[in-house]
Image (cartoon, helix red, strand yellow):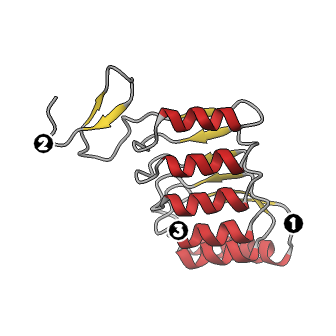
């Protein structure tokens, strides 16, 4: 753990001192290191030429960090925010400022709605890959709109059954969409 911390510190120092295009991958492995939101915030405010940032599963990634990322790292092309605690507002901000995005992974962010997809469609015409599995509030209509707005064809992974634990979903036979079923809803 100490060795990894030292390597991580050296790498971050190099990224900070050399403002060049870089690929930065941060994974949250329990046996290696818990990366604090402060470190991620420092990365987003000091590594302005980041093109790829993979924060999948990193705990405590919030809207504030994504706002900082959007405003400071406008050369971002690939970003993974899978299973982070985010809302539509931060994804909309990301799409407005990082309009060169070609890949965005948002799988497992259960509170996202069509609002962020519409923003991606209107601001990120070069998007090629979008991962949305588990985003049960996003509709097929919004995804069709995104495909219509993109310059090239977009590959979208949107499997709704990967929803939160304990959530009961049912497929609407008329529309083919998965919908939430509360215990009070009649089948």
Which residue corresponds to the image point at 66% horizontal and 68% vertical from the top-left? 69
The quarter of the picture where residue 12 lies is: bottom right
Q: Which residue is mark 3?
A: 63
Residue 71: image location, x then y, percent: 70, 70
Q: Position of residue 149 (x, y in %)?
A: 70, 37
Report the Cα–Cα distance between label 2 and label 3. 33 Å
Q: Marks 3 and 1: in contact by CB < 8 Å?
A: no
Residue at position x 77%, y 36% from top?
Answer: 151
Q: Real-space Cα distance between discs 1 and 3?
A: 26 Å
* SS label for mark 3: helix
Q: Earlier in the sequence, mark 2 or mark 1?
A: 1
Q: The N terminus is located in which quarter?
A: bottom right
Label 3 crowd (10 A; few <14 / some 14-19 / many >=20): some
Left or right side of 14 for 144: left
- Residue linked to disc 1: 20
- Judging depth in this view, the residue of 145 and 61 nearest the camera is 145
Label 2, on which residue?
184
**Mark 2: secondary structure:** loop
């Amino acid at each position: 753990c100490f060795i990894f911390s030292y390597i991580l510190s050296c790498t971050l120092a190099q990224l900070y001192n050399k403002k060049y295009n870089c690929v930065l991958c941060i994974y949250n492995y329990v046996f290696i290191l818990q990366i604090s939101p402060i470190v991620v915030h420092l990365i987003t405010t000091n590594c302005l030429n980041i093109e790829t940032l993979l924060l999948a599963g990193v705990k405590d990634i919030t809207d504030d960090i994504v706002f900082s990322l959007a405003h400071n790292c406008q050369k971002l092309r690939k970003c993974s925010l899978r299973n982070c605690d985010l809302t539509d507002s931060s994804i909309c901000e990301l799409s407005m400022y990082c309009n060169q995005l070609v890949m965005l992974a948002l799988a497992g962010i259960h509170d996202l709605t069509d609002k962020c997809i519409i923003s991606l469609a209107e601001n990120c015409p070069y998007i090629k890959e979008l991962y949305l599995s588990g985003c049960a509030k996003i509709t097929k209509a919004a995804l069709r709109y995104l495909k219509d707005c993109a310059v090239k064809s977009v590959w979208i992974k949107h499997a709704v059954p990967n929803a939160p634990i304990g959530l009961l979903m049912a497929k609407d036979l008329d529309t083919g969409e998965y919908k939430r079923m509360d215990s009070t809803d009649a089948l």
